[in-house]
Image: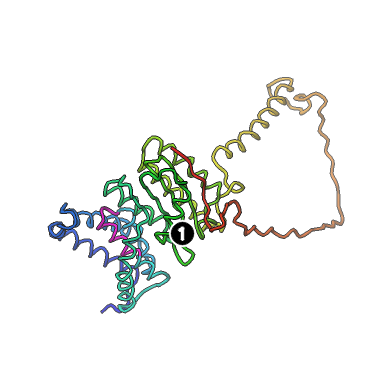
């Protein structure tokens, strides 16, 4: 009798559950009559959990924490339809409840499942991708939601993408702020998050941040993101723009978590800057070598060094020391600045951009 569930046992449980869904896929489809009788709930659950199985089969999780994380990430990446998103949210909540545990007994696992079930309605009713305009089809919306969940996972900062219709003459920044407040968006007690809004009818866009989002996303980083997103909006590549935004938010949050500081103008070295830094000294070196080459009398091998360069003489000189005194000065490492810097903040606590048109 198994009294404790470790990573291996949790993996086996998920794989067995996936096999059960596969066997009853059509029966679940037949139950799908409300709200839309499209008969794909079982299929979407099956396709979603297969991505988790693929990730689990590539690993040997030592702890129940590791196994739950791998499962949640796989489900988030492969979520299909509303049923897939709900399934991924359930395991994401379970992963958070099991965080830090090597193994869990039946009571601990039951408590984790109960906590997730009680919070599931709130999670499902508070999506990160809010398509109020109705821009995306169901599968695209589910995939975007899963990507946004993955980007926010492990960070105390939610990542929102919002589409609305026309906002008329209202300032897009003011509209986005009111939406954020009225819908109680954000993670944790300080309601941390970043929201990118597009108003399709008005052809306007804006980025706002709040709480920890103000620190994690500097003005420089937000400008970078909008520079990538806006051309896709202008081309009406709506899904591509959403994915670009979510992926760049994911990168920024990972950087902030790894290095304790946000991506900013003083620590962001792009490919162009790196190439310039490499090409410039290489060019100088090549120029010096060319000059020296032309100063040589001949390109054929000579036995004496002064035959290559006029007036060049080598001498051998040896210094002999009987005593050596060395002085060393301790230069302590400089402590990295803890200042987040680079973020403009309004008096109401919101950061972000002024927005624009596309």
Task: Decide whether residue 83 is among the magenta residues.
Answer: yes
Point 82% across, 30% down: residue: 313
Task: Kindly indicate the quadrant of the structure image that contains residue 205.
Answer: top left
Q: Residues within 10 Å of mark 1 (few under 14, many from 20)?
A: many
Tell me if residue 185 comes above or below residue 205 in the rendering.
below
Point 46% across, 57% down: residue: 193
Q: Residue furthest top?
A: 298
Task: Kindly indicate the quadrant of the structure image that contains residue 62.
Answer: bottom left
Which residue in the protein does label 1 denote?
157
In percent of width and height, residue 225 lies at: 48, 44
Tell me if residue 239 comes above or below residue 145 in the rendering.
above
In percent of width and height, residue 278 lies at: 61, 37
Residue nearer the viewer, 342 or 4 = 342
Number of labels in the image equals 1
Tell me if residue 331 comes above or below residue 269 in the rendering.
below
Q: Which residues are magenta?
A: 79-92
Residue nearer the viewer, 116 or 202 = 202
In percent of width and height, residue 245 lies at: 43, 47
Point 46% across, 62% down: residue: 191
In the rendered image, the quadrant that contains the N terminus is bottom left
Residue nearer the viewer, 319 or 342 = 342
In the rendered image, the quadrant that contains the C terminus is top left
Label the magenta part by its dominant secondary structure: helix
Q: Residue furthest front?
A: 169
Task: Decide whether residue 35 is among the magenta residues.
Answer: no
Point 18% across, 58% down: residue: 22
Q: How is the image coloured?
A: rainbow
Element under disc 1: loop
In percent of width and height, residue 165 lies at: 35, 45
Task: Kindly indicate the quadrant of the structure image that contains residue 347.
Answer: bottom right
């Amino acid at each position: 009798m198994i009294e404790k569930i470790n990573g291996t046992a949790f993996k086996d449980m998920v794989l067995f559950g996936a096999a059960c869904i596969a066997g009853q896929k059509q029966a679940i489809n037949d139950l799908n009559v409300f709200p839309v009788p499209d008969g794909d709930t079982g299929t979407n659950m099956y396709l979603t959990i297969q991505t988790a199985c693929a990730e689990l089969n590539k690993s040997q999780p030592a702890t129940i924490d590791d196994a739950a994380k791998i499962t949640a990430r796989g489900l988030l990446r492969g979520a299909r339809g509303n049923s897939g998103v709900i399934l991924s949210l359930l395991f994401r909540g379970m992963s958070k409840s099991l965080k830090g545990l090597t193994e869990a007994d039946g009571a601990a696992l039951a408590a984790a499942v109960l906590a997730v079930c009680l919070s599931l309605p709130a999670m499902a009713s508070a999506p990160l991708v809010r398509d109020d305009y109705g821009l995306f089809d169901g599968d695209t919306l589910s995939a975007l939601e899963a990507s946004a969940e993955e980007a926010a996972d492990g960070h105390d900062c939610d990542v929102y993408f919002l589409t609305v219709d026309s906002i008329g003459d209202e300032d897009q920044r003011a509209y986005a702020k009111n939406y954020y407040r009225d819908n109680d968006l954000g993670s944790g007690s300080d309601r941390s998050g970043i929201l990118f809004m597009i108003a399709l009818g008005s052809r306007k866009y804006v980025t706002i941040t709040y709480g920890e989002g103000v620190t994690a996303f500097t003005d420089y980083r937000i400008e970078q993101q909008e520079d990538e997103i806006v051309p896709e909006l202008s081309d009406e590549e709506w899904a591509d723009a959403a994915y670009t935004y979510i992926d760049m938010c994911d990168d920024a949050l990972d950087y902030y978590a790894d290095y304790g500081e946000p991506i900013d103008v003083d620590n962001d070295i792009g490919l162009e800057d790196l190439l310039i830094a490499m090409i410039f000294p290489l060019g100088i070196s090549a120029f010096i070598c060319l000059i020296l080459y032309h100063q040589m009398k001949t390109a054929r091998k000579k036995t004496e060094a002064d035959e290559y360069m006029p007036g060049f003489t080598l001498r051998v000189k040896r210094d002999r020391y009987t005593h050596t005194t060395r002085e060393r000065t301790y230069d302590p490492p400089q402590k990295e600045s803890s200042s987040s810097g680079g973020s403009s903040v309004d008096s109401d606590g919101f950061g972000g951009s002024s927005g624009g048109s596309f």
